Amino acid sequence: MRFNILLAAAAALPLLAFNASAQSTPKADAATSETADATMSHAIQAGDLRISDPWVRAMLPGQPAGGGYLVIENTGAEDDKLTALASPRAGKVEIHTMEMNNDVMVMRPVEGGLTIPAGESVTLEPGGLHIMFMQVKKGFQEGETVPVTLEFEKAGKVELELMAGPARGGMPEAGHNH
């Protein structure tokens, strides 16, 4: 029980630090009061975007790439677009699609950015759209956090810490404690 409480507290710390370290835009500044409330449910508010449930899968030894996942909800009246990603833990970070083609898993980068339609959510999850961390310098270990910067056309730059869950499994247990 105490371990789960400590794990939940550790998962929340990077989200609380977001307000102090994020590079703000005027829209993001206007949402500051909403951000504090959203942080308690593992969500970040940036302009009209609400980003929740950020996590990565721990990597097995020798694995050169890792996957990241989250949900982006656009509460605004206009589409926004995720145009760039970066992390000090990877040489290259992209949004990828994954699909099965004749029993072969095919992953491809999303070209031209990822549109977040107005009034809708886009879920990046295992087996579908996801963040692909490539040229990883040190594999992600379960329980640690992985920094990533997302850059949107309208919402600007958003810095996140993604908690590493099990290498074979779903999101970290702390991510379910809302």
Image (cartoon, rainbow, N blue to C red):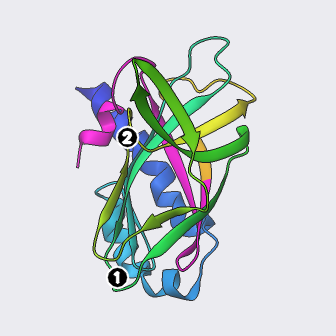
Residue visible at 56% across and 23% down in the picture: 141
**Residue 58: x, y in percent?**
51, 24
Task: Report the residue marked by disc 2.
Answer: 125
Q: Nearer the viewer, residue 11 or 49?
A: 49
Residue 140 visible here: yes
**Residue 130: x, y in percent?**
47, 42
State whether residue 68 is above or below residue 70.
above
State whether residue 13 is above or below residue 168.
below
Q: Name which quarter of the figure residue 77 lies in.
A: bottom left
Three-letter code, disc 2: Glu
Q: Nearer the viewer, residue 40 or 75?
A: 75
Q: Is 30 left, or right, of 24 in this rendering?
A: left
**Residue 13: x, y in percent?**
47, 50
**Residue 29: x, y in percent?**
51, 84
Q: Give the magenta range.
A: 149-178
Q: Name which quarter of the figure residue 8 lies in.
A: top left
Residue visible at 71% across and 25% down in the picture: 138
Q: Is 173 left, or right, of 55 in this rendering?
A: left
Question: Disc 1, disc 2: CB below 8 Å?
Answer: no
Mark number, residue 76: 1
Residue 144 visible here: no
